[in-house]
Amino acid sequence: MATDVDIPKRQITPVPVPVLPISVPQKRPLEDDHAPPVSSPLNPNPDVKPTKAQSHDDVAAMAREKPARSKKETLKKRESKAGAGAGADSSRATPDPKFKELSPNESSPMRYKLAPPKPSDFETARGPVFTLHHEVPAPDGSTIQFFETSEHVYNKKSFHYLHCIADPAFPSSFYYRQTEPEPFGAHISFEDAATHMYMDQLGRHITTDKGFRTARANVAVRQGRWYWECKITRGTIKSSPDGNVESHGHVRMGFARREASLDAPVGYDAYSYGIRDVQGQKVHMSRPKDFFPPGEDIKEGDVVGLEIQLPSEHLHRKVVQGQYNPAVDLLDEDEPTIEAANIVRDRIPIRFKQHIYLEKIDYHTTKELEDLMNPSPAGPSGTIGSRPADDPNPNHQVPALRTLPKSCIRIYKNGVFMGTPFTDLLAFLPPASKPQAQVGAREGMDDGMAGYYPAISVFRGGAAEVNFGPHFWYPPPGYLDADTDGDVEMIDVDVNTVKVATTTAKGKLDKVRPVAERYDEQIVEDIVADVIDEVDFWMRDGARVIDRTGGRDGKAETTAGIAPGREEIKELVQDD
């Protein structure tokens, strides 16, 4: 239907065309009084001035939000300063190491203030006094003289004693270092034996008229394969099928750690492994078990050879530190390492009659191994007894219950291999071994004396002779005489050329060696440790020698910063 009113047409709303900027906006002009509130390499010391739009409060707030960074010198510049002797307060010329360095109190031996040494302290150390006690006939018809030793200290009450001497070359160590008296070489230790034991003057024969007593050798084995022999000179004569034994006494032999009791036979506790002369049984933790074939035992005149095999100290430390991985570390010996143990020896000189010794706190028994030997029937709730749920193994949660892979003890009788009575020996390096808890004792420190010692026990007239080599009565299979296996060959000495023909570390660990060679190694280790302690004390004194002799040392410095020592070194008293 048409209408007279015109309807307006729709039109599109016009969209304004955007106008692009002709040029990029310029930065705000830098004002004359403008300065960054924080220092930078281009403007190290700005003079902050508040602008019109910025108050003093704003400047302080910005300074709090962004602390000033100190300018660091380049590595090259620090090295040049260090080479020119920039001083003790200059920065390090090399970056800080990633590993944590131990503080001197943790990595260094404890230091004591002592009185100046006496002139007699510089004299050679003396052995014990020998008094003839009795004589006994040997199986070969000869006579053995046994002496009572006196005028020497005994290792007991959780203390270990070593001979020492004053040496002018060790002023920072108060002039005292370790030494050895006669007889030299590997032998039964006069100090590391129970009382009421009688020996010959060379420390090869031993007996007692009391109950079981034990003595250790003066050397400890820590890695590798080592061999020694024990000949029964007074013991079982014959045994009948009904179990009756006719004897002059009894003898046991084996290996013992420092924690093992000397007032009990070897094999009495968890710290020693022993062989009985009766029926040739093996004993560990006072539990005898059959080992020799039926009808075999150990009689007078028999020679028992004992060989111990231990892994490298490198693998041993992995075990005790909880880092052992059998999938990787079983091939540990294929790539020997030159890593050395960190030996820390906390000891103090003491006097005993006419001798002077270094006294140190010895390793002591631990509750875990006591519970392993004698589990208590009443244990914590939910458990049966106090014995650990897991048997000793290399990855046990308790360090004292960790065992050493590829470790064992082999036994020979008159040159015939009898078998392997013990495998997976317990670890002995700290923290598996702990010192007696008392003032001055520090856990986790290896003093170099931890290890397995050749040990021998005698009972009521039983007597034995030890042979630590190198010439054995019955050498073990594969044994090479030390005289024909020299380790060092020197040629062209006139031109300062030395050729050292040494076997690899792997070869030394695999080769059977006499315990007598271990004595030489131990002497070298003691000398090296003494030198390291002397240098460490010298550095702690500010790289100078301080007079501790009351003015008698002309090469030393006198300083008022050192506290005076005691008037006299402690005198030790021991009851028999």
Image (tube, rainbow, N blue to C red):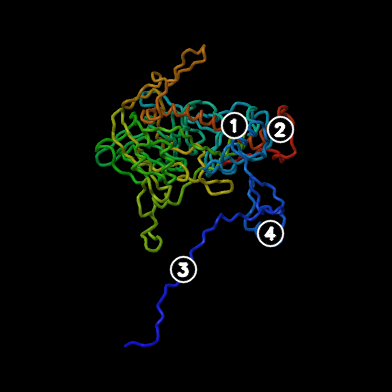
Q: Is residue 452 left or right of residue 551?
A: left
Amino acid, disc 4: Ala
Question: Foreground residue, 295 or 366?
Answer: 366
What's the distance in space between the residues labelled 3 and 4, CA to CA?
Answer: 50 Å
Quickly name the residue at label 4: 60
Q: Report the residue marked by disc 1.
A: 177
Q: Dot 2: few (<14), some (14–19), or many (≥20) neighbours within 10 Å?
A: many
Q: Nearer the viewer, mark 2 or mark 1?
A: 2
Checking the image for residue 15, the label placed there is 3
> Disc 2 marks which residue?
547
Q: Secondary structure at mark 3?
A: loop
Residue 103 position by quadrant: top right
Real-space CA distance between mark 4 and mark 1, rounded to the nearest whole angstrom: 63 Å
Residue 9 vertical position relative to residue 109 in the rendered view, above or below? below
Q: Residue at x 41, y 39 (%)?
A: 315
Of labels 3 and 2, earlier in sequence is 3
Cβ–Cβ under 8 Å for marks 3 and 4: no
The quarter of the picture where residue 115 lies is top right
Q: What is the spatial separation of the Cα atoms under label 3 and label 2, in whole angstroms?
A: 100 Å
